[in-house]
């Protein structure tokens, strides 16, 4: 692959591509929902712990308001103080007084005198006319971490279940919407398949969506134009072939008469023979064009023929095309008699051989004949005209006939060789 080439993307149906995008969207939304649920759960836990500290401080303030001599709790895990100075220095040192805001708990992590990790929290409350209090609480870190781990697992389970049910419902709804959105396109595809088989069947197309009606009308209009162009082309070919047959027959009869009256040693005899061959080829071409232009499905008449013998005769008739060129012709015969459409087969072989003789460069033309195929390889100039320039009316006629009869035809020109192959494998005797 060269740098300018791009890989061809895989072809998918609109429904398959929509389902794939829907799955990606569902995965993204599922992950976002899980993240939001976990984040919200931890936020709620933090807010709950702060609310608990505020409520505890408020309870103590109410007790002090009712009884100024109320004894505040003083335990290693839960204690309260009236002033900042009354807090033990080793605890004060854990918190910065400049960052303390009323009713906003501060949290720290420490190791106590026994070396145990603890989470600590301090809140200053001044909601009542008590002068305010400082509430301090310590909990073992292992206990809090275990609670957080349990909470995390449970949150993931609950969030996954809820998000999964939500995504399942969303997937069903969006799938239903996609199915309904794609249904008109499926109807359009089915309608286009019907008009492909029977163009008149789609003339009264009526869809519930106006845009589809417009597309259908455009397709019908394009199809009508193509049919009209095709009919004009076929009519022209029929008329042209009919008009050519009569003068060509007259020319052929006149040339045959002259050939009888002209001696073979006459200087004009070779030119007369070339004219007879050209006239015969034109008659065959006219018959082929007329057959291609007919719409009849009736197959052409078959008869036994030896393809190698037919090729030898055609090469002898066209030898004049390479008469003054340094070109040799080699026939490799491995064929038996076959039953095939002889007239059309002769036209095809004649065009292939003529094309090879006309465009061959110096060298050897190799014609390989088997019971199922004919292959012609001829040398061409390396810097000659491109391959498609040699693909004129003759080879186009071969291609059209082969396509209509179900034969396989290929023409390839690479480097200094041109190769034409005709295969009729199903016509074996």
Image (cartoon, rainbow, N blue to C red):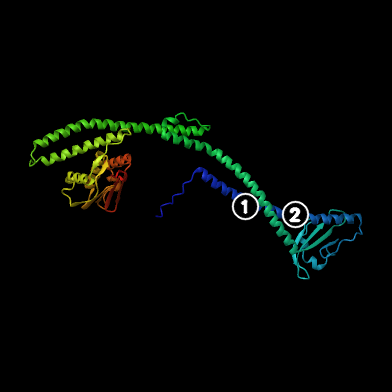
Q: Residue at x 63, y 44 (%)?
A: 169
Q: On the image, which quarter does residue 429 sit in?
A: top left
Q: Which quarter of the image is occupied by the N terminus?
A: bottom left
Is 73 situated above or below 383?
Answer: below
Residue 3 as seen in the image, left or right of residue 349: right
Q: Quadrant of residue 43?
A: bottom right
Judged left or right of residue 220, residue 291 is left
- Name which residue lies at 17% across and 34% down: 252
Please provide percent x and percent y for residue 45: 74, 55
Please tell me how crowded label 1 is: few (under 14), some (14-19), or many (20+) other residues with Cα within 10 Å. Answer: few
Q: Which residue is mark 2?
A: 47
Q: Position of residue 133 (x, y in %)?
A: 84, 59
Could you tell me residue 224's position as x and y percent?
40, 31
Instruction: Return the residue nearer the eye: 210 or 277.
Output: 277
Taking the view exactly as shown, the residue that stands out farthest to the bottom is 114
The extreme front residue here reads 429
Left or right of 74? Residue 252 is left
Nearest to the eye among marks 1 and 2: give it.
1
Q: How many marks?
A: 2
Nearer-the-camera pick, 378 or 82: 378
Q: Look at 41% across and 55% down and name the residue there.
A: 3
Point out which mark residue 261 bears.
none
Tell me the crowding category of disc 2: few under 14, some 14 to 19, or many 20 or more residues within 10 angstroms, Cα based.
few
Q: Secondary structure at mark 1?
A: helix
Residue 31: assigned label: 1
Does residue 236 appear anywhere in the picture?
yes
- Give the mark, 1 or 2, whose residue is nearer the N terminus: 1
């Amino acid at each position: 692959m060269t740098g300018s080439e791009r890989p061809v993307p895989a072809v998918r149906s609109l429904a398959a591509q929509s389902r794939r995008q829907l799955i990606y969207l569902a995965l993204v939304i599922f992950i976002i929902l899980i993240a939001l649920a976990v984040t919200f759960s931890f936020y709620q836990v933090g807010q709950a712990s702060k609310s608990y500290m505020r409520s505890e401080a408020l309870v103590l303030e109410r007790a002090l308001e009712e009884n100024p001599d109320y004894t505040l709790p003083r335990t290693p895990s839960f204690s309260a103080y009236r002033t900042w100075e009354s807090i033990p220095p080793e605890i004060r040192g854990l918190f910065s007084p400049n960052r303390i805001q009323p009713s906003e708990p501060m949290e720290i992590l420490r190791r106590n005198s026994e070396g145990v990790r603890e989470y600590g929290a301090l809140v200053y409350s001044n909601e009542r006319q008590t002068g305010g209090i400082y509430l301090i609480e310590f909990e073992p870190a292992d206990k809090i971490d275990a609670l957080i781990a349990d909470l995390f697992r449970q949150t993931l389970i609950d969030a996954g279940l809820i998000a999964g049910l939500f995504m399942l419902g969303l997937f069903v709804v969006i799938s239903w919407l996609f199915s309904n959105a794609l249904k008109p396109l499926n109807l359009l595809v089915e309608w286009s398949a019907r008009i492909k088989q029977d163009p008149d069947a789609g003339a009264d197309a009526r869809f519930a969506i106006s845009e589809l009606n417009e597309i259908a009308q455009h397709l019908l209009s394009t199809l009508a134009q193509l049919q009209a162009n095709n009919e004009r082309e076929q009519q022209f070919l029929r008329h042209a072939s009919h008009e050519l047959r009569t003068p060509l027959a007259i020319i052929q009869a006149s040339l045959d008469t002259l050939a009888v009256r002209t001696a073979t040693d006459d200087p004009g005899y070779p030119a007369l023979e070339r004219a007879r061959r050209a006239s015969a080829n034109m008659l065959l071409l006219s018959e082929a064009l007329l057959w291609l232009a007919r719409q009849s499905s009736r197959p052409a008449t078959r008869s036994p023929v030896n393809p190698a013998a037919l090729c030898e005769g055609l090469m002898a008739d066209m030898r004049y095309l390479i008469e003054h060129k340094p070109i040799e012709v080699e026939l490799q015969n491995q064929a038996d008699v076959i039953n095939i459409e002889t007239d059309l087969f002769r036209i095809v072989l004649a065009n292939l051989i003529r094309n090879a003789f006309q465009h061959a460069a110096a060298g050897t033309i190799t014609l390989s004949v088997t019971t199922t195929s004919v292959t012609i390889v001829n040398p061409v100039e390396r810097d000659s005209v491109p391959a498609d320039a040699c693909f004129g009316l003759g080879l186009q006629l071969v291609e059209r006939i082969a396509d209509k009869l179900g034969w396989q035809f290929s023409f390839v020109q690479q480097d200094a060789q041109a190769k034409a192959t005709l295969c009729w494998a199903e016509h074996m005797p």
